[in-house]
Image (tube, rainbow, N blue to C red):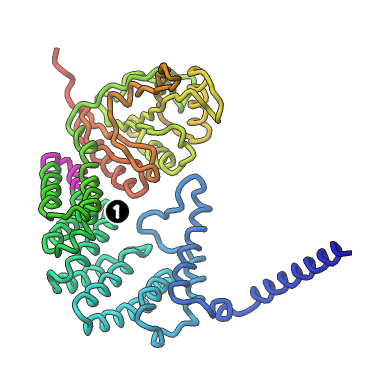
Amino acid sequence: MFMRKVAFLSCCGLIASLRALSAQSAAPASSIYSRYTPASCAELGLWTEYQWWRTQNPDTAAIAPVGYAVHQTTSTAVRDCIAQLSLAALPQDQLPGFAQAALLAAEPAKADSALTRLATIAAGSPVRTHAWLLLRIISVDLEGAESRFADADAYLSKLDALGAPASVERLLAYRLLANRAHLRDSVALESRALTAAIAATRTLTPGDRSLFGDHVAAAYSDMVNLLIRQNRRDSARTVLTAGRRALDSFGMSVVEGNRMNDARGILNGREPFLAPIGRHAPPIRATRWYNLVDTSLAADTTHPATGRPSVIIIDLDPQRWFVRTPYAIVRRLAEKYQSRGVDFTVTARTTGAWDWREVPPDSEMLLIRDFARTELKLPVTLAVSTIEFTREQNGMVTAHPDAVLSSYLPPEIPQWDTPLVAYVVDRRGLVRMVVPIRRVDETMLAHVLDELLREPVPPPPTK
């Protein structure tokens, strides 16, 4: 009897829930969003956009192409959400969220009204509050689907006019501008932004240096990356040295030194990316080669290829092949540039196990080949090397680096970032760039390959 009563009550609860959902779907939009704040409307837009792009790119990150327009589904939902809000009645702290939501709703005039009101409030505030509010405005202008660089520049000029008291906000604002420019590979704009960010670091107070030392290091690190992208290795080395000296000049205490050690680590982490630049790429020594495009053809075992640009992708951790985004980027680049003469080689290595079971090297190499072809759909040459294992007297097993890792010594990449590092090699066989395979670098990589293809073919070596 008791179980029948529980089942009856559960059934009644389900019917009530369905009726409530039906009533909500039939209700006007204003009542659905009646409890939404401007920030909630913006979050609604970001989530809706995420979901839409997720359906477009199931095998990669749900990140839209650079400079895209917000999808109509998103703009309609956010427009209905902010329709029940009165801009005039909103408090100061809700204006940035309203402006962000208005941009997602494709209503820039409303966003401008909110930001103009916030700028008016900022102008009558103390310097640090003024600087903080200008930073909020600049963030809204730059972090939208379509960055509004002209509007951000106007507010950056006002931020610069505040001088040294606004050094922190200037550093953060110009770093944000540089990041958005990097997404588009706008070299001139990124260079200007990073130069201004580094200039702002020189007027930081001792307390701000302690709190924002990692941003100081990141500004110098990003400038090093930009100079490498411009094939200016010596200038990159000079900036790296200057960054280290800047951190050393801060004169940190022992307690604050822990935070500065992290900042120094950011700069020291650039060294493995910079060291190979200008050197000849070592030949890839693999145990087995596979042509993933046409299985009837044997892969060329001379890589990197001579006389044409090459991209050598080092897979740092083959057990993380479930991270599909980097491989999707490799596939897109290979499909676009391989037919134009760029050679793509992905390296992998055996680990002695597959799908949680021990397998011999020959079987594992075939499993790696099939997975790269059918699951990752990589139209590239695959080079697989084997890892040697030794058993110590205490029973512990030691794995030794394979030939590829021993030759290239790739930099360490944070585990959450990407398992792939690309060595971009020019027609002469010289390493021009070492870069992680990430969405933020995809446009830059494409432009670099375009530039390498335009370079003349070197004459054959004289005998």
- In the rendered image, residue 419, in percent from the top left (x then y), is placed at 39, 38
Please tell me whether mark 1 sits on a helix, a strand or a loop.
Answer: loop
Q: Nearer the viewer, residue 401 or 274?
A: 401
**Quarter of the image containing the N terminus?**
bottom right
Look at the image and tell me whether residue 187 can be seen.
Answer: no
- Asked if 441 appears above or below 166 in the picture, the reply is above
Residue on which disc 1 sits:
184
Q: Nearer the viewer, residue 59 or 73?
A: 59
- In the rendered image, residue 337, in percent from the top left (x then y), is placed at 35, 37
Q: Nearer the viewer, residue 127 or 62?
A: 127
Q: Is residue 61 magenta?
A: no
Q: Would you identify the image quadrant in which residue 205 lies?
A: bottom left
- Asked if 69 appears above or below 163 in the picture, the reply is above
Look at the image and tell me whether residue 455 can be seen.
Answer: yes
The magenta stretch is 224-235
Q: How many marks?
A: 1
Instruction: Indicate the amino acid at tag 1.
Output: Arg
